[in-house]
Amino acid sequence: MEELGFKGRKMAGIIGYGVYIPLYRIKTEDIANVWGRDVDVVKSGLLINEKSVPCIDEDTVTMGIEASLNAIKRADINPEEIGAIYSGSETPAYAVKPNISIISNAIGMGPRHLGADVEFACKAGTAALQMIMGLVSSNIVKYGLAIGADTGEYYAENIGDQSSSAGSAAFILGNNPKEIVAEIKETLSFTSDVPDFWRRPQARYPTHAEKFTAEPAYFKHTITATKLIMEKAGIKPSEVDHVVFHTPNGKFPLKVAKTLGFTKEQMKAGFVVDKIGNTYSAASLIGLASVLDVAEPGENIILTSFGSGAGSDAFYIKVTDAIKEKRDMAKTTKYYIDRKKYIDYATYCKYTNKIE
């Protein structure tokens, strides 16, 4: 297969990463009070105190650009060397026109690169990561960029509007051991046809089949994929330092962790949903970035995403010595979480175009 560009599988690892979370926040009680909901019930049910809100001029392109620029800073490379870009989202800026053509141009990539937009509900970002991993490990490209970005939204009166939020994360992968801050040692996916959540063409808001959401969708896929990746890697929950799951709310990932034998301490570094809400395709990737911001060399990370439809991507990642010199080269996840400005419900509706 030499003529196809394959020179044998190399290691693939993260050489740079970055996130972006909008400045604006709305508190859970400000939405709940407008719709006559019991604030305590909503907070205890979702474990979300506030969520990020995109400004009127922010979308998955602008957020993807910001996260990618942070990733480039940490990677400390010329963006023209990035040979592939895949961006995962269920809320792309255009129905027909890729996010990646705008993002690649804005961050200084050359025009000769592989790339496409990716869609698989909330695991589109990790699907993009797997695509880049394949290209880098097979030596087709030197560096590749994977992005997860979303500006999730629901009908204003739907309880889903309490959690859906906005954010982005970007990861640059390479195969030079000296540059890698975290090696992706294993990955796999688990997928089946479960109609738990979908959005039809021309429909602005998604439809949610609630009876399929928990056990047959999120829990079955997340738990199974996590068990499979640990079996493949030959590690037990007690040997994992950090675990990150997709966070549609705060309760679901905590239940998965308990079922699998993980502790709250293992969840702590990547658990940010209570502060920013459900960022959809960016959620598990922002959690991974948050872990890398504090992880020590040699630590093990398990990452499992989830996308409605339904499927999960699971990764076994090991942190390297290079993390210490690179993580302070760009703004951290905590910086974006702490950088916030609260808005009222009327402003929220204006920014998210709920006033029509």
Image: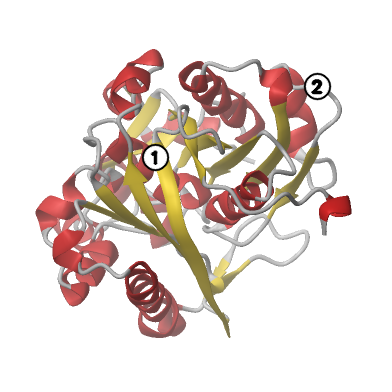
Name the kind of residue labelled 2 in the image.
Gly
Q: CA distance from mark 2 to mark 1?
A: 26 Å
Across and down, in percent, residue 338 comes to 26, 23
Q: How many marks?
A: 2
Front one among 78 and 288? 78
SS category of the residue bearing label 1? strand
Where does the image place residue 286, in percent across and percent down from the top left?
40, 41
Q: Is residue 169 shown above or below 137? A: above
Q: Position of residue 220 (x, y in %)?
A: 39, 81
From what the image shows, is residue 301 above or below residue 178? below
Q: What label sits on residue 182 in the rendered view?
A: 1
Where is 230 relative to 76, above or below? below
Circle 2 or circle 1, nearest the eye: 1
x then y, percent, for residue 272: 27, 43
- Residue 252 visible to the viewer: yes
* Closest to the observer, 153 or 330: 330
Q: Nearer the viewer, residue 306 or 112?
A: 112
Label 2, secondary structure: give it: loop
Residue 56 seen from this side: no
How packed mark 2 is, by other alpha carbons closer than 10 Å (few <14, some 14-19, many 20 or more), is: few
First in sequence: mark 2 or mark 1? 2
256 horizontally vs 285: left or right: left
* Quadrant of the frame with the C terminus: top right
Q: From the viewer's perspective, is residue 184 above or below residue 70?
A: below
- Residue under numbered circle 2: 110
Q: Is residue 218 left or right of residue 254?
A: right
